[in-house]
Image (tube, rainbow, N blue to C red):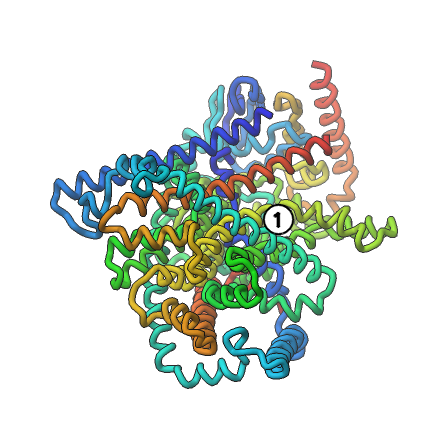
Amino acid sequence: MGGANRRVARAGISILAVIVVFVLLWEGYKLIWTAMGWENPVRPDNRTMPHTWDIFLALFQPAQRNGPPFILVELRAALMTLREAFVGFLIGGAVGFGLGVLFVRSTISERAFMPYVVASQTVPIIAIAPMVVVWGGRANLPQWLSVSLIAAYLTFFPVAINTLRGLRSPHPTSMELMRSYASTPSEVLWKLQVPAAMPYIFTALKVSAAASVIGAIVGELPAGLRGGLGRDLLQFSQQFTAAPEKLFAAVLIAGLAGIAFVGLITALEHRWIGANRRLAA
Amino acid sequence: MTERDDQIQETSITDVFASFEGDVPASGRRSTPARLVRRYLPAVFAFLAVLLVWEGLTRLFGVESFVLSKPSEILNSFSETSGLIWGAGMRTLFEAAGGFVIGTSLAVATSLAAAHWVGFRQGVLPLAIVLNATPIAALAPIFNNWFGLTNPFSKMAVVAVVVYFPVMINTTRGLLEVDPAELELMRSLAASPSEVTRRIRIPRALPYFFSSLKVASVLSLIAAIIAEYFGGPQDVLGQYIVNRAQLFQFPDAWAAILVASILGVVFYLLILAAERWLMPWHVSFRTSE
Amino acid sequence: MSAPVVEARGLGKVFGTGEAETEALRGIDLEIAEGDFVSLIGPSGCGKSTLLRLIGDLVSPTTGTLVVNGKEPRQSRLDRDYGIVFQSATLLDWRSVQKNVELPLEIMDFPDAERPTRAREMLDLVQLTGFGDHHPWQLSGGMQQRVAIARALAFRPALLLMDEPFGALDEMTREAMQQEVLRVWGETGTSVVFVTHSIPEAVFLSTRVVVMSPRPGRISDEIVVDLPPKRDLDTREDPRYFELVIEVREALRRGESGSSGS
C-alpha cells in the first residue's frame, strides 16, 4: 500500500527531525554557553553534556572490557523491558476491555466501581510498585511478571474508559435497528458495539503502550530486577561522573523503545482501518 | 484542515480523561440530594464492602502484614507516623507543584506560539507527538546528575517535562479548533489577529487547557515519585515508600501511599475548582431551570 | 438617487487550482441601491453564499470588479460598513447576551459609557428587552438569531448581510422572524442582502429577488417584488404574492434546465 509506505516515511522523517533538532540545540547550547562562560542552568562542559557524537560513538564501544558493544547490551535490555511492558499491556488491555464490557452491561457495577477506577488513577499508583513486587515474590511469580503487573496497572485504565465510551458510541437508532432484528445482547455487542468502539480502543491502546513502557522501567527499580532498562538507567546514573555518555545513550534507547511500541500499535490501527475500508468498499 | 493540522488529533491521555468526564457529570440536571444518594450509594457500598472483606479475610486467614496489611494496621500507622509522612508528602508535593507550574507555563507559551505561527506549529507538533511516546521518566537520572541529587529542582525538571506534553498538545488543539463561523464573524468586524486570540481562541481553548491540567495534576505527583525512585533525599514519599517496603514495614508504606493519594486528589480538586471559577459558562457546569 | 451600495461588474470566483479547480461564480452583474432588500435565491452550489462573502470581503474575487459603499470591498470591511448574520447564531458562550451585542463595539473601540446603552437599544429593537443578562444557551434558536441580528446592527452599518439566517429554524419561528426582520429593516433603513433557498421567504421579504443557477454560479433572472411595502399575514394570502412565488419558481426551473443543457 502506497499510503502505508508514505506514513512510515513520514514517521521516519519526524523521528529524524527530532534527532536533528536535538543535536542542533544541544551542540548550539554547548557552543554558546561555553563562549559566554555561562554555567546555568546546566554547565556546558563535556562531563555534564557530552558531545552528541560521543554519545553516538559510545553506542558502539564495548560495554565492558572485551565485551559486546554497548548498543547490543542495551538493545537486549530494551527487549527485556519491552517484553515486560508488552505482557503488562496485554493483561491491562484485557482487564480494561472486560471492565468496559461489564460497565456497559450493568449500570450498578459501573456506579459501584467506576469511581474507584478513576480514583485509582488520581493517586500516584506507581507508589504501590514495591508491594506488587513483594506479592509477586510470595506467589512465586517470576520477577519480570511482577513488573508486568505494574505495567498492567498503568495500562488498564485508559482502555477501560475508552472501551466504555466506544461501546456507548453507536447512535440510538442503530441500537433500535438491532432490536428490531431481535438480536441477542452478545450479537449487539459483537456486531455493533465492538466495531463502533474500535477507534476509541485504539486511541486508548496508544496511550497505554507508552504508559506500559514507563510502568516496566519504573517497576524494575523496586524489583531490583537486573538486565532491563530501568536498572541500567539507575546504574549508569551512579557511574555518571566516570562515563556520562552511557547514561545518555541508554536514555536514547529507552526513548526509541517507547516510540517503537507506540509505532507498532499505530501501524496495527492503520491496518485495521485499511482492512475495514476494503470491506466497506 | 491541512494534513499536518490533522496530527493534533493524535492521542493523548487527556482525551481519555476528558471523554470520561463528558460521559458522566454533565447530565445538565440539578443534583438533588436524592439523586446524589442514588448516584453515589453503590460506590459507598462497594468501598465499605471492600474494606470489610479485606479486614475480615486478612484476619480470618492470618495473612501476614507484609503480604497484605489490614486496613486497621494501615490506619494505625497513618496516625502514628503522621508527622513523618505528611512532611515527606509536603516535600514531594513541592517538587510536583514546582514542576507543574514550570511545565504548564512553558506549554502555554509554546501553544500560543504554535497557534500564531503556522510554520512553528508544523515543525513543533509532530515532534511533540513523537516525544510524547517516549518514557520521559527516564530523564530523571540525567537531571539528578545535572542539577544535583539533593536539589529539588532536578525532580521538578522531570515533572515539568512530563506535564509539558499533554498540556501543550491539548491547549494547541483548543486554540486551533475554533468554529470557522466565529473566525468569519471576527473577520467581518476587521478584528486584528491578537483580538481573535484574546476574544475567541483563548476562551475556546480553556476547556481543553483545563482537562489537560487535571491530567497534569495527577501526572505531576506520579512523576515526582518516580523521579524520587532514581535517588535523592530520603525524606520524600517515593524514597520513604521504597525504604519501608524493603524493611517489610508494609503498613507504613501503605500509610504513605494514602498520603500520596490524598495529595493527588486534593491537587485534582483544586484544578477542578479553578476550572469552575474561570469557566462558569461551560456546558458541564450548566444547570437548566 | 444616491450611488448604489453594491455594484458588481463581471464578477467571477474560482476556488482551488489545477484539477481541484471549481468555478463558483461567473459573470455576475449586480446593483443594489440604498434601502433595497435583495434576496439571492438558487439551488445549492449556485454560489449565492459565495457572492455574499465576496461583498463582505470574506473571500476575494478572481475576476471582475466589485464596489461596496463606493469603496473596495476590503476597505469597506475595514471601515465596518456592514454587519453579518450567519445560519448559526455564532454567539460566544462565555459572554452574556448583552456582552455578545457589545462585542463589535468593543472591537471598534466605542467609548465604555456608550456600549451598554447602545447594546440595550439594539436588544429593544429585536424585542429582547430584559434578556441582556441571560447566556446564549438559555435562549431558544429564534431568540439566539435575534441576538445575532442585534449584534450585526449594533454599530449601525449601512449594509446588512444575512446568510440563510433562518435556515435552521422551524416554520412558525421562521415566519415570526421574517416579520421581525422587516420591522427592523423599516426602522433602520439599512440595505439588506439576504441569502435563502426558500421561495416564499424571498418573495415575502424582498424588494427584489435575484435568481441564481449553478455550475457555474450565475444570475439567471431578477424579479422585482411589487407588493406593498407594508407586509403582514395578509400579504401571504395576497394573490399577487402567489403569482410572484410561481414566477420565482419558474425562473428557478428555467435556470436549472438552462444549466444542464449547456
Q: Position of residue B85 (x, y in %)?
A: 38, 77
- Asked if C229 appears above or below A278 in the picture, the reply is below
Q: Is residue B45 visible?
A: yes
Q: Residue at 50% of width from left, 32% of height from top?
A: C55
- Asked if A28 appears above or below C130 in the picture, the reply is above
Q: Is residue C194 left or right of residue A39?
A: right
Quadrant, the C terminus of chain C: top right
The amino acid pointed to by label 1 is Tyr
Q: Is residue C149 visible?
A: no
Q: Chain of mark 1?
A: A
Q: Nearer the viewer, residue B109 or A196?
A: A196
Q: Nearer the viewer, residue B66 or B177?
A: B66
- Asked if B277 appears above or below C65 in the picture, the reply is below
Q: Nearer the viewer, residue C88 or A110?
A: A110
> Which residue in the protein does label 1 denote?
A200
Local secondary structure at mark 1: helix
Q: Residue at 48% of width from left, 38% of height from top?
A: B5
Where residue B203 sits, quadrant-wise, is bottom left
Residue situated furthest front in the rendering: A66
Q: Position of residue B116 (x, y in %)?
A: 37, 41
| Label total for image | 1
Q: Position of residue C86 (x, y in %)?
A: 57, 43
Residue situated furthest top in the rendering: C262
Q: Position of residue A260 (x, y in %)?
A: 48, 40
For disc 1, the neighbor class at 10 Å (few under 14, some 14 to 19, many from 20) is: many
- Asked if B123 appears above or below B241 in the picture, the reply is above
Q: Nearer the viewer, residue B118 or C110?
A: B118
Q: Is residue A40 left or right of residue A90?
A: left
Q: Is residue A149 left or right of residue A190?
A: left
